[in-house]
Amino acid sequence: MLTVEDKKAIVAEVTSNAMIAQSAIAADYSGLSVDAMTRLRSNARQAGVYLRVIKNTLARRAVEDTEFACIRDSLTGPLIYAFSPDEPAAAARVLNDFAKDNEQLVVKVVALRGKLLSPGDIKKLASMPTRDVAISQLMAVMKAPVEKLARTLAEPNNKLARTIAAIRDQKQAA
């Protein structure tokens, strides 16, 4: 049995994680084995996702003064909570990948930066690129025009060099 102090500590811990999180996901975990839960926790830890099973009343208090207050009314049943502090899609990727192999895990609530999404949006959120991939894609888009300009500016000199080489080869052949 949890004491009032224990409950306050749990709420404070979840609140601090919710304050820095970019996304929050709650999923029904009933029917999962202990081994499956251990694998899920391990996957979450490796991805930098905060994962916690707490009573819904405590979870409602924990998210009350955060941008995830929008999920308060959706918290019913046995839920596991995942908060993603570093990148918005990390928690979605962990739970979505885990749910593919474990049908007992059913996503009930998805929130991104304070906006409540439908549970089906977890697939879209999970398919978002990581921060590093997004930066590399942006850099490639920014670099392409500069490379094309450099090739265009260098082309007259290259054409002159090829023409001179062709004349040289033609004179040597004759």
Image (cartoon, grey):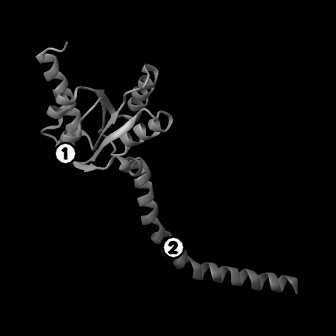
Disc 2 is placed on an element classified as helix
Q: Quadrant of residue 91?
A: top left
Most foreground residue, 15 or 118: 118
Residue 108, position as x, y percentages in the image: 32, 40
Q: Quadrant of the C terminus?
A: bottom right
Residue 24, position as x, y percentages in the image: 28, 40
Q: Is residue 107 left or right of residue 116?
A: right
State the residue at coordinates (26%, 40%).
21
Q: Earlier in the sequence, mark 1 or mark 2?
A: 1
Q: Amino acid at mark 2?
A: Lys
Most foreground residue, 109 or 154: 109
Q: Badge 1 is on which residue?
A: 70
Residue 9, position as x, y percentages in the image: 16, 22
Most foreground residue, 106 or 133: 106
Most distant residue in the top direction: 1
Q: Amino acid at mark 1?
A: Cys
Q: Quadrant of residue 5?
A: top left
Badge 2 crowding class, 10 Å Cα cut-off, few under 14, some 14 to 19, many 20 or more, is few
Residue 22, position as x, y percentages in the image: 27, 44
Q: Badge 2 is on which residue?
A: 148
Disc 1 is placed on an element classified as helix
Q: How many marks?
A: 2
Q: CA distance from mark 1 to mark 2?
A: 47 Å
